[in-house]
Amino acid sequence: DIQSIPDFQNVETETAYRSQKPQQQQPPKTATTSPSFDIRKLEKSPDNNTNPDDRFMQILAFCKGKEAVSVRDIQRSSIGRDLSSDAVKYAFQWLVDRGYGTISEEKTGGTVKVSFTPF
């Protein structure tokens, strides 16, 4: 019985309040999500209606002509300075899934360096 749940009103009010925020709670319609990464982080702002695919293509353009580009290389560039390493890895995977290149992992000590090699 729903009425026996304490604070049911508060939960409903809080949910309604959350839905008032500008699009931060809803993924873009074109996005596919991954459990470890929120694709919305690839957008410049929550209300600019840019397609995340455009950002992936910018990363691809940055990688073109280079032998291999690491997550850190992307984060140091103007294109990816606002992205987490998970966001960059997701972008690399997105590019690989569409046939633009390959991903390699190199273990050094306790860290793993993930790189993207464009075709």
Image: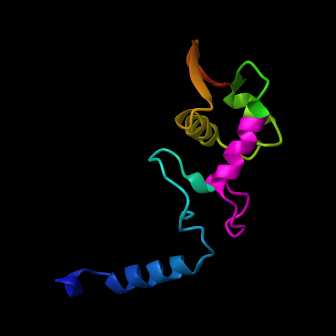
- Residue 103 appears at what percent x and percent y? 58, 25
User: Of residues 6 and 12, which is closer to you in this image?
Assistant: 12
Q: Outermost residue toward the left?
A: 1
Q: Nearer the viewer, residue 118 or 68?
A: 118
Answer with left or right where residue 16 lies relative to residue 119. left
Q: Which residues are magenta?
A: 41-61
Q: Is 42 situated above or below 105? A: below
Quadrant assignment for the C terminus? top right
Colour mapping: rainbow
Q: Where, quadrant-wise, is the N terminus in this rendering?
A: bottom left
Q: Is residue 75 visible?
A: no
Q: Is residue 52 magenta?
A: yes
The front one of 106 and 68 is 68
Q: Position of residue 37 (x, y in %)?
A: 53, 47
Q: Is 69 a magenta residue?
A: no
Classify residue 61 by image quadrant.
top right
Residue 112 x, y percent position in the rendering: 57, 21
Q: Is residue 33 left or right of residue 70?
A: left
Q: Position of residue 116 (x, y in %)?
A: 64, 26
Hey, which quadrant is residue 46 in on the image? bottom right
Residue pictured at 47% horizontal, 47% vertical: 34
Residues 88 and 60: in front is 60
Residue at 60% across / 71% down in the picture?
23
Residue at 44% x, 85% y: name it.
Answer: 13
Residue 74 visible to the viewer = yes
Number of marks in the image?
Answer: 0
